[in-house]
Amino acid sequence: MEKKLVNTFLLGFPKSGTTALYYFFRAHPDIYAPEVKEPNFFSKHNLSCSYMKKAKGHELYFNEYINLFDNAYPINVDCSTSYIRDIKSLKNIHKYNSSAKIIVILRNPLEIVSSWHYQKIKEGQEQEYSFKRVFLSDMDTIYDMDHLVRIDTLDYRKVGSIRKQISNVKILFQKENILIIDYVELKHNPHDVQHKITDFLGIKYKPFTIPVKNKTNRVVNNTLRKLSRRLHLQEIAKLLNISFLSYIAKNVLSKEYNKDKNIQFLKKNGFFKSDVEFYHNFFVKKNER
């Protein structure tokens, strides 16, 4: 069997520590993770994948994808989290390399969905600040169906359906080639998780301290965001060293985002109940034994 260059995939879940593991992969001497964290090649049918825009035919696009990696390393990893949301993407991966190693970080789906909404607002992709409204409304009533990019990336029900997505992975790939990690363990015991990953990949463990990022729960209203950019408030404040303008740009034009409120809303209404139970049974009960 021909050896495939890309032999490992970190599939997700989004907002579950995949960026932290990406930094770990980048630092390990036996693992190559390209500068493009999420090339999304196997989701090329998915219009939400920005890297797709470079495609000029499948063969050329495939060569561009492969050139992202380095055959001098025994492990080449693709960290595209879009793959796990769609069975077609997983089938594309399996067709390319049926023996690929699959790594998935599992997190409470209520936390995933709330954090995903928060990120989409920060990125400017999500225009609706009310999590309750956007979650309960039919996608067609909020978004123009011509904008398929946004329809896909803002499908919060799909993002949180972890049980079905894990099931798809298990159907396509062999059990011994799948490693499922608990987000809570990654957060509190990262070196233990790094050990598990290197053992799974058959390489030597090299400790790595994941850098801690400054986090904020503030988001900028999209209209005010555009106004701030048009007036170049932050640039002017930095150039003239005017702390008042900087304060306005960072605080007055933003508001606090309450992730816990969203989680309570989902829990109260029973959304993702089976997925929460799946996560609980997979890790929490296992840890209680």
Image (cartoon, rainbow, N blue to C red):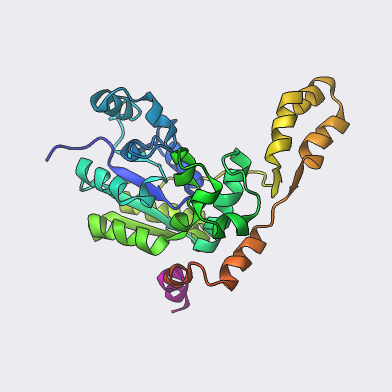
Residue 66 quadrant: top left
Q: Is residue 152 left or right of residue 168?
A: right
| Residue 202 visible in the snapshot | no
Q: Residue furthest left?
A: 1
Quarter in which the C terminus is drawn: bottom left
Question: Which residue is drawn at the image coordinates 56% and 48% (left, top)?
Answer: 142
Q: Main secondary structure of the magenta part?
A: helix
Side of 34 relative to 254 (left or right): left
State the image coordinates of residue 54 (x, y, percent, origin top left).
Answer: 38, 24
As drawn, which residue projects farthest toward the front? 141
Q: Residue at x 46, y 42 (%)?
A: 145
Picture mark count: 0
- Along the horizontal axis of the image, is 12 left or right of 200? right
Quadrant holding the N terminus: top left
> x, y percentage for residue 36?
43, 32
Span of residues in magenta:
279-289
The answer to whether residue 29 is above or below residue 116 is above
Residue 25: tell me if it is visible.
yes
Q: Percent x, y for residue 202?
A: 29, 49
Extreme residue in the bottom direction: 289
Between 3 and 270, the one lying in front of the other is: 270
Which quadrant holds residue 229?
top right
Q: Is residue 109 magenta?
A: no
Whole-percent x, y for residue 235 in the image: 75, 24
Comparing 231 with 193, the one in front is 231
Q: In this rendering, is residue 281 above or below 112?
A: below
